[in-house]
Image (cartoon, rainbow, N blue to C red):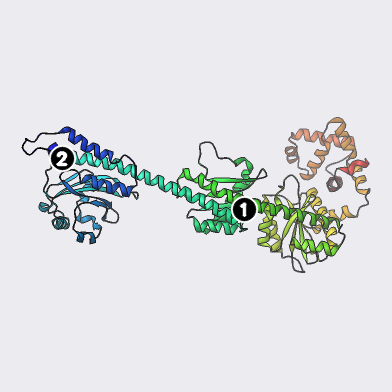
Amino acid sequence: MSANRCDERVPGVARSMTEPAQPDVNAVDRQWARLYNAFDHTEGLDATLHKLTALACTLSPWYASAVVAIDKEGGFIERLAETGERAPIFALLPTRWPLQTSPCRELMRTGENLIITDVGACRDYPLYQAEAVAQAYRGVGLMPCGSDGAGRPLALSVHSREAVEDSDDMRELLSRLACIARGEILRAKACDAEQARLRRMERYAGLGAELMESVLGGRSASEVVGQMAHNAGFRLALLDIPAQRAYFTHAKDEALAPALLADWHNRGTASTHSPSGTVALSEPIVIEGRLAGAVIYLDGTIAADEVRYLLLHVKSALSSLLLRSHLHAVGMAAGLKSIFETLATGEWQNSQVFASSARHLGLDPAAPAQLFALNMDAGVAADAPERLAHPLASCCPGAVCGRAADLLLIYVPCPSDGLSSTMKQRIAQIVNDTLSLSARALAESPVITAIEAYPGAIRTLRHVLRLAQALGRSGRVTMATFDPFAFLAATLDKNAAPEFITSTLGQIRRYDTTHSTRFVDTCMAFGESGCRYQETADRLHIHVSTLRYRIARISELFNIQLTDPDVRFSLDLAFRLERLLGDGALAHG
């Protein structure tokens, strides 16, 4: 396009009618400078598109301009912005047309600017030609100029009243205009994206404030998470690790609960910080130095750099919620510990007052119930009662658990004839699964129907657990499980068992102590291996010839023939009684 033709449409650039036409390069430069300067500040996409069409109309020979979005999947084009002189009736026409009837189809095919010198002479698009006749335009320029926020290709069109030439000047004009359009559309989309991000940030902050108000109002965890589900479209999970409970904003995610709870319980406090340089998809909740829970983002609808901002805002309210639950659980645990320890000792001043206090915590000493007991040794976490509370209550309504000195006690209401075998097995499974225990004994009491029976029942449970540990038993156990050894240990005179152990093993132990030998271990391993030499040697990590030498020395020194069944029975009985009675059994020797 020549400079003279451009000057005719640029305000402030005049030309004398009596002077010959002269190219004015400065005027052309000023014209493009005004176009660039019109975008001195970034606006949203809608405003930018309207501004582009208005500025395109300042360029000769164009009198009208529009921006359309090309929906290839839907098979239509949609007008997004326009500027130009149109009769009012045209405002009533639709803003969408079939892509098949538009020259935009050719634009999409080539990806290059398209010039239609005279629509009236173009037979390829009859409907487009009819529209051109109705609106009285002839020349058309079409330019690809990027895409809208939904990713649909955009095209900028310009119209002239007269036919246009497909010249180098015209192509240069369209190329420069398209370049401006693409750059400004990119900036506009970035502006829209930033504004949308800021609105989301405000929404996250507002959500955090709403949740905190609900927590302070006393709403439960399920209600608060339900509020998140109502007000937010993204998927979140709240884990209450001590209680082993998970809450989800979307019900379809509930199947993830076991894996999430197991993973976070195994992490402990070591995972309270995300690795350096990574975006956290979860936020741990730590109370009194312990990992109490986590809020986890399960969706993919939020940009990664916004996830942590979201989690931090909802974490504040959810931390307060878990703190409230934690304080309630601590109070409950302390109350149950006091109740169980008093039941174990029987030292209550007034049984009716004590029973009333116990019922307030969910334990009725006068109603039929069964107790289950587990040793609270180093292998059992201190928060075991909190973690068992919910799964046990879900399985057995009314079940509660707590500590009594070195025992973890579980109280389960039952019919007068006791719990079913299936229910007992479910309780044992819950204990094993929740506490990740294996090869542990869970002692079980008979049905208890009176408060006075509790001290004796708990003493029996403690004795059963000691028997199970001594005899290597696991799973559900009762006193009947250990006959006849339980009966033997209970009926022997208090000095008889230690004396038998001393007479059987005492001299061998003293020799081991004095000479740093392992004859006692050899006797035990040989008996437990069924007199099989190779198996015994493997257990002791020695050669078979060394084992044979030891057995010969034992026979020589102590006149003990390990191949004699009666001798092996005496040794086995001594070993078992020693485990039953504890390390003090040899004190008499």
Residue 39: image location, x then y, percent: 30, 41
Residue that mark 1 sits on = 321
Q: Nearer the viewer, residue 328 or 526?
A: 328
Tag 2: amino acid: Cys
Q: Nearer the viewer, residue 471 or 176?
A: 176
Residue 297: image location, x then y, percent: 52, 49
Residue that mark 2 sits on = 6
Instruction: Kindly tell me whether residue 196 is visible in this rendering.
Output: yes
Res 168 label: none
Instruction: Kindly tell me whether residue 446 is visible in this rendering.
Output: no
Residue 59: image location, x then y, percent: 18, 43
| Residue 133 shown left or right of residue 177 in the figure | left
Q: Secondary structure at mark 2?
A: helix
Q: Are marks 1 and 2 in contact (CB under 8 Å)?
A: no
Determine crowd level at label 1: few under 14, some 14-19, many 20+ residues with C-alpha closer than 10 A: many
Whether 279 is drawn above or below 390: the answer is above
Residue lying furthest bottom? 416
Q: Nearer the viewer, mark 1 or mark 2?
A: 2
